[in-house]
Structure formats: structure tokens, C-alpha cells
Image (cartoon, coloured by chain):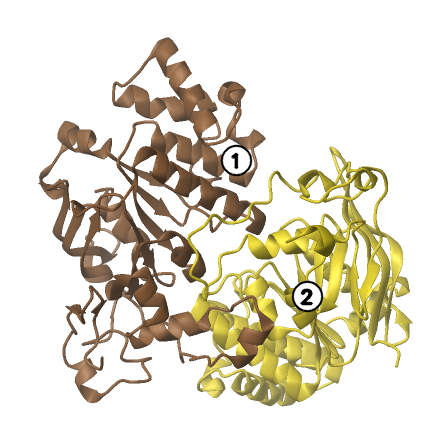
Amino acid sequence: MPIGDEILLDVKDLKMYFPIKSGMVFQRKVGDVKAVDGISFTVKKGETLGLVGESGCGKSTTGRAILQLYRPTAGQVLFEGENLGDLRGNKLRKVRRKMQMIFQDPYASLNPRQSLGSIIGEPLVIHGLAKGKDKQERVQELLRIVGLNPYFVNRYPHEFSGGQRQRIGIARALAVQPSFIICDEPISALDVSIRAQILNLLEDLQEQFDLTYLFIAHDLSVVRHISDRVAVMYLGRIAELADRKALYENPLHPYTKALLSAVPIPDPTVEAKRERIILTGDVPSPVKPPAGCNFHTRCPMAIPQCSQFVPPLVDKGGRHHVACIRV
Amino acid sequence: MAPLLSVRDLKTYFRTPDGVVHAVDGVSFDLAAGERLGIVGESGCGKSVTALSLMRLIPQPPGRIVGGEVTFDGMDLLALDEEEVRSVRGNKIAMIFQDPMTSLNPVLTIRRQLSEGLELHKGMSRSQARRHSIELLRMVGIPSPESRVDDYPHQFSGGMRQRVMIAMALSCDPQVLLADEPTTALDVTIQAQILDLVKRLCVERRTAVILITHDLGVLAGMTDRLAVMYAGRIVETAPTAELYENPKHPYTIALMKSVPRLDEERREKLFVIDGLPPDLIDPPKGCRFAPRCFAVIDKCWEEMPELMRVTEGHNAACWVDVSKGRS
């Protein structure tokens, strides 16, 4: 499906803080884990937005906060123009039918005591879409769509391999005919030769069902393969957001540059010639993130001003957004 | 010159309630002094079991080294008794494991864990070992090692713990370092730091390395020679540059084409290896890759191919010369 101009998801200044409590009986709040600290982006209908970053950067929390699995601390999530933060109960459930999630761990995200028919059929029952024989037929159709044998309906998750389980998770997400799917590290728990199978399946499904993806991953090569636009997160904020080609061929933010240079390329001749930017130290704690630009403690280009204010995400032309005062 | 480490027809089996798993089934390779060898393969292909067999760390039962020879520095490692093995393990052959959290003892200080090998193998006194431990921590880039040496593992980040593991592995100046997925649990910028460190230290000390991973990218920049494992056997081995440029075994070719690359603009579908690796309780009679192979011929089902010469130093276990039939 060609990517239109219609904005499906609009995230505005989203913040997700988790309180840190102390004390046995009278718990006092002693601080916050600032998992997501003011991020804004849009996702257009039919596109795939890749969200990359290292562990703890807040990419998964962003996904969950969009679905209102966590109630965001501040900010807005507009889906088809509707502010999800205002919705409760039944109304929220109705919107959620259109937004589904595929999880990272296909071992933990399927209930071992439910048969495939029950796992994939449950969303149909909850949303009142099908029951009885219709449900059974729909489940078999979904199994066929994701490349599994329809006769598997009465089997249980433990009878399947990791890749097959991930297909089951995908079938469950597709059951309610969503328009938007958040894929949270859908292939990182799988073996190398199985990853390509799942990636190709996700691409086929996108075409077949006009899906819009938010693809969350830490593997920059995979994100390049599947995304139309890419956002790079660091410690709860977006450092850079651009079209795929621009981001990979002309990264502007020093963090993006370092991140890309750190990814090994399976080609010894290329590897021998590459200049690697090795960042020193670890990612700071999101409990006490550095003042100003939160990357300044590890940045090779940092100047004193970097620690004084938070650099806004600005468009440097051609929809290439960067949050850095040195660019 | 005789190789430093020579493995011939190694077989390690595991007895399970379902039958005997042929985890490593006839693996042979040589390692020269100071050489860096990479072993690549998917989970369950036997690469870790190979490493554990060399260290004589196979839990027995259920595992057992049922055949083969491992010659190290003139000794047959498989024939040594437990006491003799202990004088080699950690001393002349050391190992770094994948998960730095579970491979360090959480209730002992870093000093205790680092000193253990030094006191045991090098006969150092407690204060000498402490001084040497501080030096080792400094060598692997731990800031203020004098105070950190008395800390516990939980006070270190993942990357720092892996540095401690490296310090521990190199503490007795081993001739061979076995690194089993040393960076799989780490973020990409930390991975770059750790790989850089391992490579620099091992070049300086002329330590031979066996690097085990599923990541073809990591191996490209780190190794001199590669061995590709599939279902308990080595299917191809060649100098690193040769293997990437001119892979011969269909599994190697498929594996390389199924991974998206960071430096490639590619929107067409990834190459897919259909199906799953075989059950190692009852492996196929012929070539173990035959059921998933794109170049399979009748002979493949009947007879298991041994490693055959392609060019000098490049061997592949395949009946088909794929280069002729491939575009």
C-alpha cells in the first residue's frame, strides 16, 4: 500500500515516569524513573516507523504507553484523531481493536494452558466478532494466513518451535483486523535462519492487510530493512528522526553516528576499512539523567552549552529531525 | 608447525528421556598459536557444547564425550584425570561466557573471584593476588580499580561485568581463550567496546581465540578463520575473507543472504531457509542440511558428505558444487 498523507498516530510530548518508592509501611515517593521523557512523533497510514535504541532507552515503554497499557504521565496519544488518554473502559477497548501488539518473547507471551484455537479465538470473543463455528473457521483461516497448518487448532504452544510460536502471536494480533500493530522486538528471540521467515511474513501481511507498523528493535540492520522512517531513542528521548535512507546514509546526531559505526557488518573487507566511534562508559541511569542533552556525558562533540538546556528536535530540512545543538 | 590445539572427530552426546542427542557429532579443527578462529552457527548446532567439551565441562551425566581426540600442547585433554584437567582449565585454556550476570558469583567480591585463579595456578599470596587483580582490572579499563576490586558483581553494569570476566579469563596468561557469545547479552555500543578490548589484548599477548557466536557481523572483523557449524557438524571452514567472499556450502550461502545488512539499501525480500534444523536424536542419514537445502540432489539423502577441499585452506562438506549451478 502506498503511504498516504493521512496521520494514523500522533504522539505529542509523551512522558512516562515510574515512581520509585521507599519505606515499608508509609511509602514515600523518592524519585522517578524517567523511562520516556517527552517524545513526539507521527505515524502515517501504511508506513513502518522503526524505533531503535539500546536497552533501557524507553522504546518498549513508548509502545506500551501508546496502547495505554501504562497510563502516560503526561502528553497525548492521538489515534485517528482521538485522544486515547481520555478513553476508559468500553470505549478504550473499542479503539484497541484497531491497535494490536506482537511481543518479543514467544515463550512468555502465549498461555501454555490454552490451545491455539483458544489463544487466537479469544480476541474474537472479547470484541464480539465471532463465536462458535464462525470463530473456529476464522481461527483456521488466520493460521493459514500466518503459514501454519489449520489442523493445529487444538494443539498447545509447547508443541511448537520459537518461530512457529511467533506466528501464533502474529495470528492473535491479526484476529481482530487491526490497522496498526506495534511489533516489540518480534524477532530478537529467534534464531538467525528463522528471523528472515518472520520478517518476510510481516512484510507480506502489511501489504495484504494495509497495516501500519511501529517496529521496535535494537538491531539497526533489521530496522533498516523493514522501516520507511526511523527514530533513534536515547535515555527516554528521540535523538534523531528521519527517512530511512537519510538516517543510514547521512546520520547527523553524534549518538546515531556512534551507534551505526558500532554495528558490525558481515564483510571482512568492509570491516577492515571502517572507522569505529567507540563510546566510552555506560548509558546513565534514567533515575538521574544528565542535565541538558542527556547524551553529553558520552558525546565526542560535547561543549559546555550541551549540559545547560535540552536540545529540541528540529527539522534540518527534508524531514530530517535532530536534537543536537552541534549539528 | 604443529597446531597448538587439535580437535579430531569429537563426539559429545547427551542422554535424555527421549533418546540420545548427538549434540556434537564428529567435529575436527586445528588452532594455531595466536590464531583467531570463529565458530558460527545457530542455537543447538553444537558450538557451545564443542567449547565446553574442550574445557571438559560437560555435565556428566547426562552428557558424555563419546569419542575423538583433543590434543593441546602435546597432551590429550580427553585422557587427563580431573586433577590434571584443573591445572589446564583456567590456566592454559580459559573461557568467557555469554551471560556475565550468571557467570560471576554474586556473594563474593570481585577480588575473591579474580584472586582464586592467581592463587591456585600462579601460587601467589593473597596480597600479591590482590595487587595483580587491580592491575588486571586496570588493563580491561575499569575506572578506579583500587576501590572497585572490593565491590560485588551487582555493583557493576553488564559491560563492566563482561570486562571483569575477561580480566579473569586472561589472569593466568592462557594460550587459548574460548569466548562463547561474549557480547550477545550486551548493547551494540558496549559490544563494540568489548570486542575491541578482546582483540587488542589477545593480539598483544598472542593469545589464540576461539570466538563462538551466531552473529556473522561480529566474526568478520574479529577472526582469521571461520568454521560454520550445522546440526553438530562443521559444514564449511575457510579463512574469514575467503568464506565471506566465496561461500560454498548452501547453508553458509543461505545464512549470509538471510541477514539484512546495515550498509545495504535493500527492499526486496530476504532469502529464507525453510523449515527447522533436524532433530539431533535421530538425525537424517545423509547430509543434515538436505531437508532445507536449495541445491539438494539424490546423493545428499543417502550419504553424509565429509569436509572436502575447495581451495587451499577452504573445505566444504557438500556433494554439490553450488557455484556452477548458481547465478
Which chain letter matches label 2?
Answer: B
Residue A49 point in image, percent of width and height: 29, 52
Task: State which quarter of the image contains the C terminus of chain B.
Answer: bottom right
Report which quarter residue A136 is drawn in: top left
| Colour representing chain B | yellow
Foreground mark, 2 or 1, reads 2
- Please say if B237 is above or below A307: above
Q: Residue furthest top?
A: A133
Closer-to-camera residue (A193/A13): A193
A104 in relation to B181, above or below: above
Residue B251: x percent and y percent?
67, 51
Query: In which quadrant will I find the N terminus of chain B?
Result: bottom right
Give the drawing colour for chain A.
brown
Decide which of B159, B290 is in the foreground and name it.
B290
Q: Amino acid at mark 1?
A: Gln
Secondary structure type for disc 2: helix
Count residues near mark 2 (Cα–Cα under 10 Å), then give few for <14, some for 14-19, many for 20+. Answer: many
Residue B303 showing in the rendered view: yes
Q: Disc 1 marks which residue?
A: A164
User: Residue drawn at (72%, 79%), measured in percent from left and top?
Assistant: B174
Displayed quadrant of residue A69:
top left
> Which labelled disc corresponds to residue B243?
2
- The reply to whether residue B113 is in sight is no
Using the image, determine if residue A211 lies above or below residue B25.
Answer: above
* Horizontal side, residue A86 vs residue B207: left or right: left
Which mark, residue A96? none
In-front residue for pair A17/A91: A91
Residue drawn at (42%, 21%), measured in percent from left and top? A141
Within-10-Å neighbours for mark 1: few <14, some 14–19, many 20+:
some
